[in-house]
């Protein structure tokens, strides 16, 4: 939509590195919440990305796109920070900006801090877990994060787990407003398997284990691949579908080749959001044994702050398996909507998958509980109302 100024009332500007068509959990949360806010009161500043022009034309709110780096290198992070400060100052002056919402603490948070000091504009900062671990070893980063938080109106964590992380870091609970991810339970719902997808992937008479998400180390795809080697001994008709793309793709394909699982592991690549319900409904069990990142220098210590994909799978009536790391225990209730496992235990992951595949009644009970919880506790409209209180 055209970004024409609107001077009759104060505008809230969201500055975020993650917004559709960029695919990530953070991107989904921001889009689902902000599209439910009063369109005359909001603007979005986000990076240019392939397909963004087509996406933006369909939206009723104003989206400003700029060439802001989206990488994770140290250089990219510094450039994000500089660009966001510059553009925040420009648009805070150009439009009647009453408040900035900084989608990331380091790349966007300093933009809020500078705008407050120079222009008197208030701001909020959003956090997702592990920031104090990944950046807390640097005195400079620690100082900057604490300065950004101190000057902010609110710190907005995505789960109770993330809130506790920052509380341990010395941030008072009264400073924080938790806004958890949600799910559209009308869009994500139980349905019959898509005949087209069953035919496309050769899933006739197969039991499907599925992971949906970016192919990152902390998602645990590698452990599921290793577990599937065991599972296929008891359930030879098992297929593991990996939905998504990411930096770990080639390593995961090499691992599947090494274990001779060519007939049991399918990489679908990128899947459009509108097709995701069809994919979730292909599976018998959703699994994402999330853990802390260890091998990636820029992301070391990163963990799953919540996990919106667990809610999406639950809304489709699928039992979920999650790792006992980060905030996933808030997205999956152990023994009720799914099962929590040691994400570094190949045997435990395998046995848990087998338990669900072997007991259809148990699997159905978990899945239906996940569906009920998605409908009752994680409605986007309710979450947007909470957001509106700090707009």
Image (tube, helix red, strand yellow):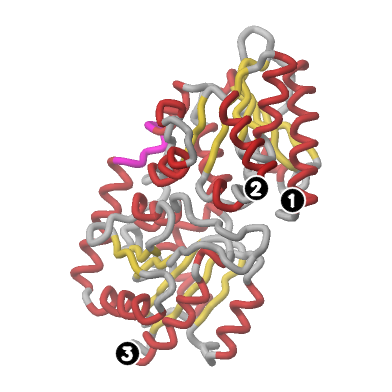
Q: Is residue 170 above or below residue 241?
A: above
The quadrant in which residue 109 appears is top right
- Mark 2 neighbour density, 10 Å: few (under 14) some (14–19) many (20 or more): many
Magenta stretch: give its range.
377-382
Distance from Cα at disc 3 to Cα at disc 1 = 43 Å
Which is closer to the viewer, label 2 or label 3?
A: 3
**Image quarter hosting the N terminus:** top right
Question: Which residue is depicted at the point 51% across and 88% down?
Answer: 261
Q: Who is closer to the viewer here, 164 or 209? A: 164
Mark 1, residue position: 50
Inspect the magenta stretch and tell me whether residue 209 lies in it.
no
Q: Secondary structure at mark 1?
A: loop
Question: Which residue is depicted at the point 81% across and 42% down?
Answer: 67
Mark 3, residue position: 234
Question: Which residue is depicted at the point 31% across and 80% down?
Answer: 351
Distance from Cα at disc 2 to Cα at disc 1 = 7 Å
On the image, the x and y values in percent for residue 162 come to 45, 44
Res 21 label:
2
């Amino acid at each position: 939509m055209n970004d024409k100024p609107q001077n009759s009332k104060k505008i809230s500007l969201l500055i975020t590195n993650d917004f559709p068509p960029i695919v990530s959990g953070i991107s989904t949360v921001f889009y689902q919440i902000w599209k439910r806010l009063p369109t005359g009161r909001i603007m979005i500043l986000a990076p240019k990305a392939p397909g963004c022009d087509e996406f933006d034309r369909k939206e009723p709110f104003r989206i400003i796109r700029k060439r802001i780096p989206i990488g994770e290198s140290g250089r990219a992070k510094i450039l994000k920070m500089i660009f966001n400060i510059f553009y925040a100052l420009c648009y805070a002056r150009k439009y009647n900006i009453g408040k900035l919402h900084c989608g990331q603490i380091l790349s966007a948070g300093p933009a809020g801090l500078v705008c407050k000091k120079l222009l008197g504009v208030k701001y909020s900062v959003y956090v997702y877990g592990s920031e104090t671990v990944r950046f807390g070893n640097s005195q400079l980063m620690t100082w900057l994060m604490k300065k950004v938080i101190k000057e902010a109106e609110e710190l907005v964590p995505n789960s109770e787990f993330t809130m506790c992380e920052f509380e341990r870091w010395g941030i008072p609970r009264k400073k924080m407003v938790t806004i958890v991810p949600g799910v559209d339970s009308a869009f994500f719902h139980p349905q019959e398997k898509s005949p087209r997808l069953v035919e496309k992937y050769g899933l006739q008479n197969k039991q499907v284990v599925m992971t949906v998400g970016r192919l990152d180390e902390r998602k645990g795809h590698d452990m599921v691949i290793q577990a599937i080697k065991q599972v296929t001994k008891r359930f030879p008709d098992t297929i593991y579908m990996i939905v998504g793309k990411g930096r770990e793709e080639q390593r995961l394909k090499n691992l599947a080749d090494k274990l001779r699982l060519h007939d049991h592991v399918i990489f679908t690549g990128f899947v459009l959001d509108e097709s995701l319900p069809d994919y979730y409904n292909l599976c018998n069990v959703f699994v994402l044994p999330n853990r802390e990142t260890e091998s990636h220098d820029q992301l070391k210590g990163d963990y799953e702050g919540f996990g919106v994909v667990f809610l999406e799978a639950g809304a489709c009536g699928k039992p979920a398996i999650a790792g006992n790391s980060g905030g996933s225990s808030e997205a999956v209730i152990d023994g009720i909507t799914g099962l929590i496992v040691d994400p570094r235990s190949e045997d435990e992951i395998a046995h848990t998958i087998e338990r669900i595949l072997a007991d259809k009644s148990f699997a159905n009970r978990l899945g239906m509980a996940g569906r009920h919880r998605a409908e009752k506790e994680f409605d986007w409209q309710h979450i947007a109302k909470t957001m509106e209180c700090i707009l």
